[in-house]
Image (cartoon, helix red, strand yellow):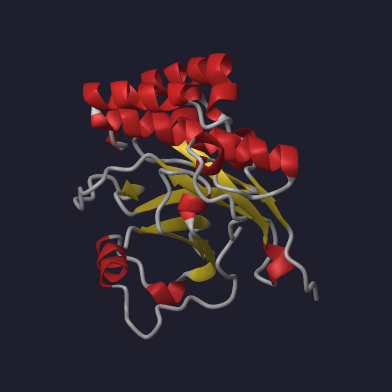
Amino acid sequence: MKTYLEYKLFPKLEDVFVDSTPQHEAVFFPLLTIDLKSINKGEGKVHFVCYFRNGEDTIINDPNLGYNFIRFKIIGDKYQFNGNFNEIYLFEKSIKWYEEAKEIYKEHKEKYLSNSDFVKQEDAKRKEIDFEYYYYIQGVLNYWVTRDKYIETGKFIQGSAYTYGNSNQEREIFTDFDAYDDEGYPDEILEETLTELKLNLDTLDYIGSLKGYNYLDLGADETVLFVNEKLKEALIYYNWS
């Protein structure tokens, strides 16, 4: 029996998704890959993923995603998204914004690593145009800074430490991989979501949880990963407490 955790931070998109596309790239942000055997929870690999969510909309128009969850089909060690990309919040704009973010990072990467006044000025300009535009661009750039500095240094420090001079303490990679713990208080929003999806918590295998905002500013306070072995699905639940 293995007693050590095998994981990979910031896995590549193509290692997470079957037939990944530019659409996947613009809205899905891989955070952490876990080898299930290393935590004695079966075979294969599963992935924590953040996505650009629909903020306060609690209406589920697509059973594969909502403001606080997303579902993926598990095929081998990868995911397949069977939902409607157009149901993802500001999807068409995200495609354009993502391309813009790539150009910004390509041209000004060093400024995003050095607490530059340029970054603050650019943030302010985008915020005046459209808050969601600012929020998306800033979140994607933060993801890349956090990822690239981790790859460079081996230290998991939130990218805002480099870009804005925030805390440079090393962050927790994950919260736990034991049993799902609601601290004695049932998560009513999770229960309501599962009811709408016609799922039962007892049929889901809890894999683990992490703090999404350690990885990127778009991340939830708590990101919880479940696997439905019967349906061969991963369910990621986002707690925006």
Position of the N terminus by quadrant: bottom right
Residue at left offset 42%, top offset 42%: 51
Farthest residue to the front: give it.
117
Farthest residue to the right: give it.
1
Residue at left offset 59%, top offset 70%: 177
**Percent position (x, y) of residue 234?**
50, 56
Where is residue 134, by image quadrant?
A: top left
**Percent position (x, y) of residue 201?**
40, 73
Residue 197 horizontal side relative to residue 119, left or right: left
The tally of labels here is 0
In the displayed structure, would residue 105 be above or below residue 144? above
In the displayed structure, would residue 210 be above or below residue 76? below
Residue 68 horizontal side relative to residue 76, left or right: left
Query: Between 235 and 6, which is closer to the camera in this rendering?
Result: 6
In the displayed structure, would residue 238 be above or below residue 147? below
Where is residue 139, by image quadrant?
A: top left
Residue 221 horizontal side relative to residue 170, left or right: left
Residue at left offset 67%, top offset 43%: 150
**Percent position (x, y) of residue 43?**
70, 62
Position of the C terminus by quadrant: bottom left
